[in-house]
Image (cartoon, coloured by chain):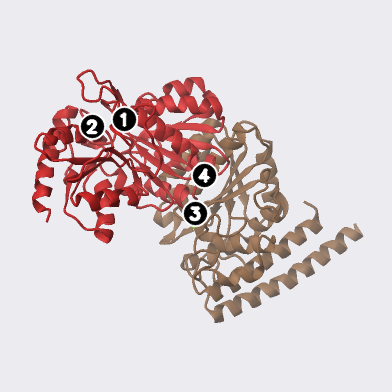
Chain colours: A brown, B red
Amino acid sequence: MIKTKRYKLELIANTLRQDVISMLAHAGSGHSAGPLGLADFFSVLYFHILRHKPKEPLWEKRDRFILSCGHVCPILYVTLARSKYFSLKTLHSLRTLGSPLQGHPHRGSARGIETTSGPLGQGFSVAVGMAIAARMDKTSHRIYCLTSDGEQNEGQVWEAAMFAGVKGLANLTLFIDRNNIQIDGTTDAVMPLEPLADKYRSFGWHVIDCDGHDMDAIDDACAEAKKKRLKPTVIILHTTPGKGVRFMEHNYIWHGIPPTQEQARQALLELKEARKKLSGKSLATKLLSYVS
Amino acid sequence: MSASTLHPKLYTKNLEQIPTRNGYGEALLELAKHNRHVVVLTGDLAESTRVLEFSKKYKDQFIECGVAEQNMAGIAAGLALSGKIPFISSYAVFSPGRSWDQVRVSICYNNANVKIAGAHTGISVGPDGATHQALEDIAIMRTLPNIIVLAPCDFEETKKATRAAAAWNGPVYFRFTREKTPCITTVQTPFEIGKAEILKKGRDVSLIVCGPLVYKALIAARQLMQEKINCEVINNHTIKPLDAKALLTSIKKTKAVVTIEEHQIMGGMGSAVCELLSQHYPVPVEMIGMRDTFGESGKQEELLEKYGMGVKDINTAVHKVLKRKT
Ligand SMILES: [Mg+2]
């Protein structure tokens, strides 16, 4: 990825994080850690990888993005708003009566939401169904599906993984947000998953481990998945829950709660500082590339 | 509707008997001829849900999901959201029995155009025993928004229900039975989703029935005629949405009801009828069905008799409800 592109995506990720904080503090409920940890991924996915037309959300040839771990929807909502599927103002209605932005995503409520999700494991199977349909119709769009690591506890995940592996659904790319936390604690404390990569490999998948905050790595992993002809690919995104807000990072307490107004103020300050450094860093790299 | 549209051999000894599930398999073959978007899924039950021939004839429209009903429900939702018309074929105890959450969220809340065919419903499943006798499926399906719930009464009607389900835009659940049951209706008998069919007119009591027990209701009504009791027999194949107009019209005339189904009396078709009556026109009701108990292995007729769903039980219920009628 060229540097200016990456700089743009980094700025977007920072914006998405600020949007998440503001939206959650305003709503007074919702999940914080997962959405912040996924901002870099959503920036790369929606502003670089996906073929989609926000003005034509049901465009038949669009790539499908299925959010299976519905509870991280704040990051989906802010990404959809920043992609211009709906207005930024809509974000303030999160979780309120009559809002298109339900506590967990509902297909048909807001533009750009492909499926209803929340109960874990379900989106994965729906994505598999879409991949089969695309294969039947010989269409070239791809199916992307995001699951969480806690979600891997569900039996349905392994039913879907077994099926997709056996059928060789190469048009399907699965992501696992490997942030090592779930509601009751660390994934190791609740239900250890390792060796996760080996499990998928043994189910017939191509597996890529990837730093979920390295935009180039995410981009490369998606490109690698696209080249596979016989196997579905799972990209294990190693992310830091709460990324970008120091008092939230790595702390499972932040899985399911929003920041208070005061905490939000503090978080936004930190993110704005980070944004300045981002432009500084980018300026330096720009100058460096100019010199060399 | 007059009785003339029923099978001409209805009350004869050589009335033909065919399992309702056969109608499902045959209708799917017809549908696929004209519609490449019809897709059939099964969870390792192609033969007994009667889609084996489909799987051979329409390989590209058939998906073997293995014994994984939750994933199968999700795959069907994904297919439907991509423009396909998927039919999930399994035993009702597994699908929607094991996949209820997936049916609720991935299918109903998404309003995905998925058809769920539940085979082996009722106590008449027989020798397989209680684990395989679906007696709760109507209850768990009819509480979900967006879904249609059907219980066709015979082979011909199952064919019609399958075609109607394909034509309907939205989730549909329909159930059928394992054993051979009498062919009550003909190709000409009307069938429309949401429209109860009056098979026999009467004025003393309304027998509201679904599934192959419609036949037993007709036989009971015929016997009761000899006692000068005139039953109205209604084939209430659509449990959701109920045909409130037709049912209330009948009940306002007869002022007594017997509901008959191969399902738990809690939450089933009879319960749906009682919900309607208690709000609009309360009259005495007797309910025939499973009484909060599991079934067991046995032969179809033995089981129906033991668990109170035989012709004799219908007669008894009619006498009982008539005594309560004011
Ligand atoms: Mg997690």
Pointer 4 with pointer 1, Cβ within 8 A: no
Q: On the rendered structure, is B66 left or right of A170?
A: left
Amino acid residing under circle 1: Asp
**Whether residue B44 is visible:** no
Pointer 2 with pointer 4, Cβ within 8 A: no
Residue at the disc numbered 3: A117
| Cα–Cα span, label 4 and label 1 | 33 Å
Quarter of the rendering containing residue B174: top left
Q: Of circles 2 and 3, which is in front?
A: 2
Q: Which mark is residue B215?
A: 2
Residues behind callouts 2 and 3 on a single chain: no
Pointer 1 with pointer 2, Cβ within 8 A: yes
Residue at disc 2, secondary structure = helix
Q: Which mark is residue B154?
A: 1
Q: Of circles 2 and 4, which is in front?
A: 2
Residue at the disc numbered 4: A126
